[in-house]
């Protein structure tokens, strides 16, 4: 029975892909089981970790060209690439260890896109880890945008929090776009002056879970002049829930801890 014959809802497709790539929260797992309530075979499949199935199917030469819904194959590939670049995949024993002690996967009719999805996660992951590849910044942002996970905010002046003193540089505009799930984002600037010799701009991400005192560096970058530029955001530590982004002027190469005195722009996310 293929996916269309099972009549699996689109939301279930999305949750199953996330389950194979990243794992689900308790609420998401409950939602998934409710969506698959009319498919006993699917519920039985959920009782076995996706990674048990992955190991068995890869070993058996899984036909990974099975009938994935349109667009899902690319999504899984991109998510697997993102995982290989640092998106944490929570699991217990390794797939090989678990598959060696489990034969349940052989008793299941592992046809259709669910098995193929699981295979792709590991197949792409193993290839990329072996070859040092990974999802590009553009791929991550495209996936996050397509799933409505990107939040945006415009730059405003970064006035001193205590005195209200204006920033060292004014007249800068643009915006920041960010995805908590993909842990990446993009900044655009217009009117940002070229860096002086021995200096760089540095982005600081304020995590709602950590607060301002534990801000995380998200980029160290130069600027050739006031024309519009785009800069990728690559945080040095995982961000739970980004609340604001601030740009300062620091010494060339950036700093580990900033006194935040040489301020430029600030963007706060409305959640």
Image: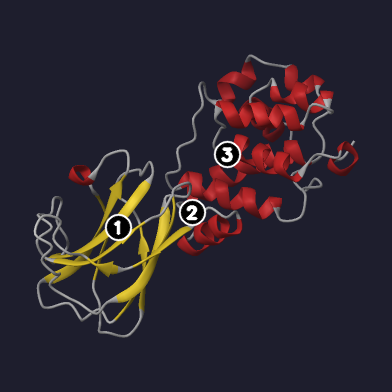
Q: Residues within 10 Å of mark 1 (few under 14, many from 20)?
A: many
121 up-or-down from 31: above or below: below
Q: Please give the name of the residue rendered at 63% of the width and 14% of the height, measured from the top-left corner.
A: 101
Locate residue 266, reporting x and y percent: 26, 63
On the image, numbered disc 2 is attached to which residue? 134
Of residues 8 and 17, which is closer to you in this image?
8
State which tag comes first along the sequence, 2 or 1.
Answer: 2
Q: Disc 3 on helix, strand or loop?
A: helix
Locate residue 174, reporting x and y percent: 36, 74
Q: Which mark is residue 211?
A: none
Eye-nearest disc, 2 or 1: 1
Q: Residues within 10 Å of mark 2 (few under 14, many from 20)?
A: many
| Residue 44 picture quarter | top right
**Mark 2 touches mark 3? (CB < 8 Å):** no
**Would residue 89 be found to the left or right of residue 10 on screen?**
left
State which tag comes first along the sequence, 2 or 3.
Answer: 3
Q: Residues within 10 Å of mark 3 (few under 14, many from 20)?
A: many
On the image, numbered disc 3 is attached to which residue? 21
Q: Please give the name of the residue rendered at 17% of the width and 75% of the height, measured from the top-left corner.
A: 169
For the residues labelled 2 and 1, the Cα–Cα distance comes to 26 Å
On the image, numbered disc 1 is attached to which residue? 245
Q: Disc 1 on helix, strand or loop?
A: strand
124 up-or-down from 31: above or below: below
């Amino acid at each position: 029975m293929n996916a269309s014959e099972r009549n699996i809802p689109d939301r279930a497709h999305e949750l199953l892909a996330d389950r194979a790539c990243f794992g689900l929260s308790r609420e998401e797992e409950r939602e998934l089981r409710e969506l698959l309530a009319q498919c006993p075979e699917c519920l039985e499949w959920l009782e076995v970790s996706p990674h048990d199935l992955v190991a068995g199917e890869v070993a058996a030469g899984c036909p990974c060209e099975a009938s994935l819904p349109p667009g899902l194959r690319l999504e899984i590939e991109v998510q697997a690439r993102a995982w290989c670049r640092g998106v944490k995949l929570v699991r217990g024993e390794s797939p090989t260890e678990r598959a060696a002690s489990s034969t349940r996967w052989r008793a299941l009719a592992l046809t259709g896109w669910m098995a193929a999805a699981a295979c792709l996660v590991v197949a792409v992951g193993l290839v990329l880890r072996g070859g040092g590849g990974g999802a590009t910044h553009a791929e991550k942002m495209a996936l996050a945008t397509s799933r409505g996970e990107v939040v945006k905010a415009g730059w405003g002046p970064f006035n001193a929090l205590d005195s209200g003193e204006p920033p060292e540089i004014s007249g800068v505009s643009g915006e920041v776009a960010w995805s908590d799930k993909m842990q990446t984002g993009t900044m655009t600037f217009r009117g940002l002056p070229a860096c002086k010799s021995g200096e760089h701009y540095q982005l600081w991400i304020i995590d709602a879970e950590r607060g301002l005192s534990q801000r995380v560096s998200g980029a160290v970058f130069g600027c050739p002049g006031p024309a519009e530029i785009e800069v990728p955001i690559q945080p040095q530590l995982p961000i739970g829930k980004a609340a604001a982004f601030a740009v300062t002027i620091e010494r060339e190469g950036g700093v580990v801890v900033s006194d935040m005195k040489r301020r430029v722009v600030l963007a706060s996310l409305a959640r």
